[in-house]
């Protein structure tokens, strides 16, 4: 007589088998089958957005500061989105929502200048000046790169009324939504709907704001089936590095006031396969490690890029100190002392663009040279600063000098008035600059220092209402000789 399996045990075995088969079947289902299109309903245009503005034609930026162009709601910015409409705030997830899974990447980004681009004091001061001179609609030009989410949601210019995602600067949700980049001057096309929903709810919500059961289900699905999410977050413009061109190449009145992208194109770096990403998204994390909130057995990352974006400002914490180190590492100083001559060579060793780049009418890199007699008396000086913090005339400064139509130097970063470049002594990629200083005969000791600061003393006084001497001066390299 055969012995039958007890009914309770049979039920347990059957349940285990069904769960196992279900899990195996779920493993075989492609992630694309678990997603649905993300429909974004445009916002109505508020009255202030079009009221009282001239009907523009989308022509030259400097001729349409206060224009409203139905063909592009964001005039005078050249930025667009695929719907030519104002987006709801939820179209762009907050960095905190992304950071709830991507912890290390979020922590990297929080240390970057991108995180402060919409709230940086220098930007806000210049923005106020621009609005005062050209009208509130003109600020859309700045917002295209500094506060792109605020531009897309129509919140820009509302002064302290922007949502959290709009104040987040150049955020995860913005960069990863870019469909195409057409040129510099902020000429990108944003498509937040490219990011699909997973079944259940909105996995892009910030968990601190509370998640529904459906939201939790969708977050589970995206963590176990991330392929569709990864596809959505890798637009071609982002992978090629061309996304950087849109904001790091800016021309106005026929003058290139920012040329980082074209500086890179003119260097040897493209032929070597070195892009913006190669330097500014260096892997600062173990390439194959999982984030703590992403721990899924058997899944390993192919590659994980650091998002702390080294370089740029040495004023904005928390990366100020590290950015000084990056500058120091990118530059070389060579000094040769002859009878009454000091020959100095400064080389750009590692940057794929000029140094300084970006807001190069503000950033100052210069040489300070001092010569002393045997008694210790200073008998020669160049590159020293006066009591107001201004670098003395006839010093060797590596920078770009912009001027208005009357030929007056622009000291407020009022680039909308730029019509000519008076001087460009920056150090190009793969290049160097040389300087010669004549010192008195009988000089006993010479010191040479390569110095940097983010803004001139005049800008600090006029725009920031700060003392010129309050701007930190960093010593990148120094050399001393005894005779």
Image (cartoon, rainbow, N blue to C red):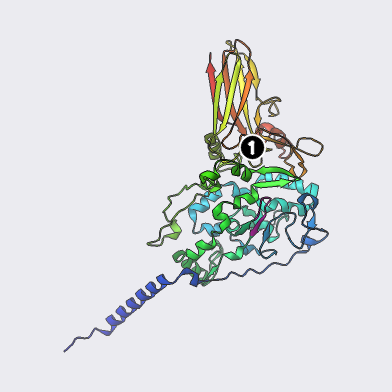
Whether 98 is among the magenta residues is: no
Q: In the depicted view, which residue is nearer to us: 40 or 16?
A: 40
Q: Secondary structure at mark 1?
A: loop
Task: Name the residue carrying label 1.
Answer: 454
Q: Does 1 sit above or below residue 244?
A: below
Crowd band around label 1 with a 10 angstrom C-alpha radius: few (<14), some (14–19), many (20+)? many
The quadrant holding residue 441 is top right
Q: Does 44 sit above or below residue 176?
A: below
The quadrant holding residue 46 is bottom right
Residue at the farthest left position: 1
* Relative side of 11 to 351, left or right: left
Q: In the depicted view, which residue is nearer to us: 349 or 138?
A: 349
Q: Position of residue 212 (x, y in %)?
A: 53, 70
Viewport quadrant of the N terminus: bottom left
The chief SS type of the magenta part is loop
Q: Does 272 sit above or below residue 197?
A: above
* Relative side of 351 to 71, left or right: left
Whether 188 is among the magenta residues is: yes
The quadrant holding residue 55 is bottom right
* Relative side of 123 to 317, left or right: right
> Does residue 301 appear in this view?
yes
Magenta part of the protein: which range?
182-189
Query: Residue placed at 64% from the left, 47% from the top?
Result: 248
Residue at the farthest front position: 271
Query: Residue placed at 47% from the left, 69% from the top?
Result: 31
Q: Position of residue 208 (x, y in %)?
A: 54, 61
Q: Position of residue 383 (x, y in %)?
A: 65, 25
Q: Position of residue 144 (x, y in %)?
A: 68, 53
């Amino acid at each position: 007589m055969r012995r039958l399996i007890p009914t309770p045990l049979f039920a347990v075995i059957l349940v285990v088998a069904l769960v196992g088969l279900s899990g195996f079947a779920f493993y075989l289902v492609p992630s694309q089958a678990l997603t649905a299109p993300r429909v974004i309903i445009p916002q109505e245009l508020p009255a202030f957005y079009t009221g009282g503005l001239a009907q523009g034609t989308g022509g030259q930026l400097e001729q349409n500061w206060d224009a409203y162009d139905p063909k592009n709601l964001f005039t005078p910015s050249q930025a667009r989105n695929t719907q030519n409409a104002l987006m709801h705030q939820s179209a762009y997830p907050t960095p905190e929502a992304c950071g709830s899974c991507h912890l290390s990447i979020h922590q990297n980004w929080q240390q970057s200048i991108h995180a402060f681009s919409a709230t940086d004091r220098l930007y806000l001061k210049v923005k106020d000046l621009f609005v005062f001179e050209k009208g509130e609609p003109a600020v859309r030009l700045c917002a295209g790169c500094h506060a792109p989410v605020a531009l897309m949601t129509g919140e820009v210019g509302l002064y302290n009324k922007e949502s959290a995602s709009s104040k987040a600067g150049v955020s995860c949700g913005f960069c990863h939504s870019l469909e195409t980049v057409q040129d510099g001057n902020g000429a990108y096309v944003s498509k937040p709907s490219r990011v699909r929903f997973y079944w259940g709810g909105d996995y892009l919500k910030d968990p601190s704001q509370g998640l529904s059961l459906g939201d939790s289900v969708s977050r589970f699905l995206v963590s176990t089936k991330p392929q569709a999410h990864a596809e959505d977050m890798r637009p071609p413009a982002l992978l090629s590095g061309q996304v950087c061109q849109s904001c790091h190449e800016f021309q106005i009145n026929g003058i290139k006031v920012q040329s980082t992208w074209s500086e890179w194109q003119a260097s040897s770096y493209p032929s070597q396969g070195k892009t913006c990403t190669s330097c500014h998204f260096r892997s600062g994390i173990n390439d194959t490690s999982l984030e703590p909130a992403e721990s899924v057995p058997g899944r390993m990352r192919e590659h994980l890029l650091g998002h702390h974006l080294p370089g740029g400002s040495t004023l904005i914490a928390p990366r100020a100190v590290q950015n000084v180190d990056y500058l120091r590492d990118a530059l070389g100083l060579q000094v040769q002392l002859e009878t009454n001559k000091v020959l100095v060579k400064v080389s750009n060793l590692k940057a794929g663009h000029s140094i300084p780049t970006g807001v190069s009418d503000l950033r100052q890199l210069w040489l300070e040279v001092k010569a002393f007699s045997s008694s210790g008396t200073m008998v020669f000086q160049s590159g020293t600063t006066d009591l107001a913090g201004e670098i003395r005339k006839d010093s060797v400064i590596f920078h770009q000098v912009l001027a208005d139509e009357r030929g007056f130097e622009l000291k407020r970063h009022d680039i909308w008035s730029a019509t000519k470049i008076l001087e460009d002594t920056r150090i190009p990629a793969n290049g160097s600059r040389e300087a010669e200083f004549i010192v008195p005969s009988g000089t006993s000791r010479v010191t040479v220092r390569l110095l940097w600061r983010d803004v001139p003393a005049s800008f600090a006084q006029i725009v920031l209402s700060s003392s010129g001497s309050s701007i930190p001066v960093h010593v990148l390299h120094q050399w001393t000789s005894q005779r």
